[in-house]
Image: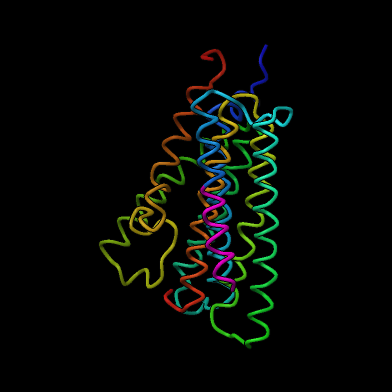
Amino acid sequence: MPDLREGIRSGPGRVLIAVYGVFVIAAAARSSVQILTRFDRAPLAYLLSAFAAAVYIVATVCLAQGVRRIAMMSCVVELAGVLVVGTVSLVVPQAFPDATVWSGYGRGYGFVPLVLPVFGLWWLRVTRAGVR
Amino acid sequence: MIDVLATALSFAALGVAAWSLVLILVNRRFALNRPYGLALAGAILVVELGLLVQAVAGVIAMISSGRSTDVLVLVGYLAGPVLIVPLAAVWAAAERTRWGPGVLVIGFLAVPVMILRLRQVWSGHA
């Protein structure tokens, strides 16, 4: 019987996790700089940046370790986050004086933040026990 | 920052990404016991060493010039690629299918992007 953990993190899943890893570094670095250097300028946006970074970390670790349930939840939170923050950043731009990874639906990152959770959920579905 | 090195590293990283793409197309994994894999590993090592030199030279340049703007951002863009390259290499080598080189494509496309951002922030066009 194939190891379920291997199932998620092998094949296309390995590339998916690699993209997640890049976003962990991008989001974590961005929010650290924002919070350490100018937190008082836009606390809400910067806390959201930190939250996004935390979600990427959880998603990456859980995908790599095969913790299916939490991985799925973090993908859903990510998708909701990018849709809500993306919409708010376009409709009420003054609420986000500085960008987060999710601003403008992840425009600053080639819209990858919008596509990534969809791929994550798809991959979790494809690798479900019994399907593969 | 050393402009020549930054340019050379960008092209070298793109070269590794292109090479990895070829491996995917001909359905090869990132195999360290094969000449094509070993040569790729060598190229990755050279890029990593170059990135280390860039990071050290960049930090020295910032300290000696007494730079005070965007210091933390620059350190991030100097250190980021240094971290990404070995992580991508290890993560790619652990995969037994053609998706291993796929990891290298992702990692080594991120490197030139970070170097580009480094140069923009360095010259003040943040």
| Secondary structure that dominates the magenta span | helix
Q: Looking at the image, which residue is at 44% across and 29% down?
A: A122
Q: Looking at the image, which residue is at 37% across and 68% down?
A: A96
Asked if residue A50 is among those painted magenta in the image, a careful observer would answer no
Asked if residue B11 is among those painted magenta in the image, a careful observer would answer yes
Q: Residue furthest right?
A: B33
Which quarter of the rendering shows the N terminus of chain A?
A: top right
Query: At which x and y percent is residue B85?
Result: 64, 49
Left or right: B40 in relation to A53: right
Left or right: B78 in relation to A124: right
Query: At which x and y percent is residue B14?
Result: 51, 48
Range shown magenta: B1-14
Q: How many tags in the picture?
A: 0
Query: At which x and y percent is residue B30?
Result: 64, 31
Q: Residue furthest bottom?
A: B66
Query: At which x and y percent is residue B86?
Result: 69, 48
B23 above or below A56?
above
Which quarter of the rendering shows the C terminus of chain A?
A: top right
Q: Looking at the image, which residue is at 64% across and 36% down?
A: B92
Whether residue B94 can be seen here: yes
Q: Looking at the image, which residue is at 48% across and 63% down?
A: B116
Judging depth in this view, the residue of B19 and B86 nearest the camera is B19
B83 above or below B122?
above
Judging depth in this view, the residue of B116 and A52 nearest the camera is B116
Left or right: A103 in relation to A34: left
Whether residue A55 can be seen here: no
> Coloring scheme of the render?
rainbow
Quarter of the image holding residue A58?
top right
A128 above or below A33?
above
